[in-house]
Amino acid sequence: MTKRIALITGASSGLGREFVLQLDQEKDIEEFWVIARREERLKELSDQCTKPVRALAMDLTEEGSIQKLEAMLKEEQPLITWLAAAAGLGKIGRIRDLSRRDQDRMIQLNCQAAVDVTDISLPYLKKGSHVIEISSIAAFQPMPSFAVYGASKAFLESYTKALHYELIGTGIHVTCICPYWVKDTEFMKTADPEQHAEYYRHQPLKTASRSVVRQSIIAAKMNLWVWTPGIVTTADRFFAKFIPHCIMTPIMDLWSRL
């Protein structure tokens, strides 16, 4: 009998971890496959879930990781009922001040890894399956001091919209989630590990991971192609459609300095 699984990347903390905890209530999941670098964090999820949790400790930016996951899927032939690509990386700073390695890793994880995990999962999606790609409010306009991160999320939003369209009629739901700052994650610790960034020090009206994930699951079931959980990201998505980027960009630069 085909096993029904949920495949969650970035599951050791933040939104990825919250997806596991909330999806644990879904009846169409028999087992979680959770991916992140920190194996001990992944194993801790087993004690908090009613369903089995398989911890796959891997760095999706490292060569061979995708091939390893693909081989596991081919061997076990599961039905992926939920795929949540929640792994992501951001670094704050002007382009000239960021290292090439940091910029490359953002592109590799936010773009390439998300696409690769989705691609190898497609043969195991069926009618009723859900795909959730975690983009960002940063996708809606250029982001000074967050340029590569914003560009990577714009790529992911565009990719997810196209995938949503291509799978219309298959019964597979594809949704892009574009949250604002989420307060109870480790994102800022990674984006600014020394805690002395000149930009984005204040993020008023921040959202919570529990709310973002709850709304994301509802949006996925409704097969919305983009969902903005929260008033700030919803407003930004609206205004970014009508205000030229030549105006939105300096506005975002000013916002980053508040």
Image (tube, helix red, strand yellow):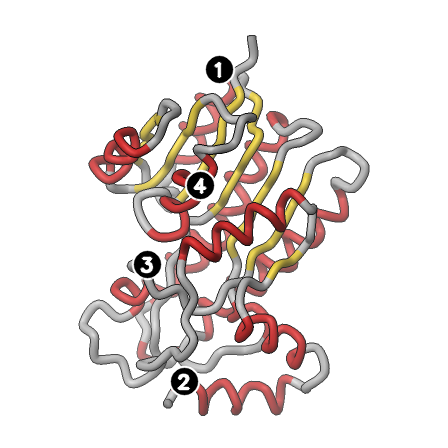
Q: Is residue 43 above or below residue 105?
A: above
Whether pointer 1 and pointer 4 mark residues with C-beta atoms closer than 8 Å, the reply is no
Indicate which disc residue 22 carries: 4
Identified by mark 4, the residue type is Gln
Q: Amino acid at mark 2?
A: Ser
Contact between marks 1 and 2 (CB within 8 A): the answer is no
Kindly check if marks 2 and 4 are in contact, taking CB atoms under 8 A apart as contact: no
Could you classify mark 3 by the number of other residues whose Cα lies within 10 Å: few (under 14), some (14-19), or many (20 or more)? some
Q: Which residue is mark 1?
A: 76
**Snapshot quadrant of residue 195:** bottom left
Residue 110, how many percent across, how many down?
Answer: 46, 55
Q: Position of residue 38 (x, y in %)?
A: 24, 41
Q: Is residue 217 above or below residue 125?
A: below
Which residue is the extreme one toward the top? 1
Residue beneath disc 2: 256
Which residue is drawn at the image coordinates 63% and 29% (left, top)?
125
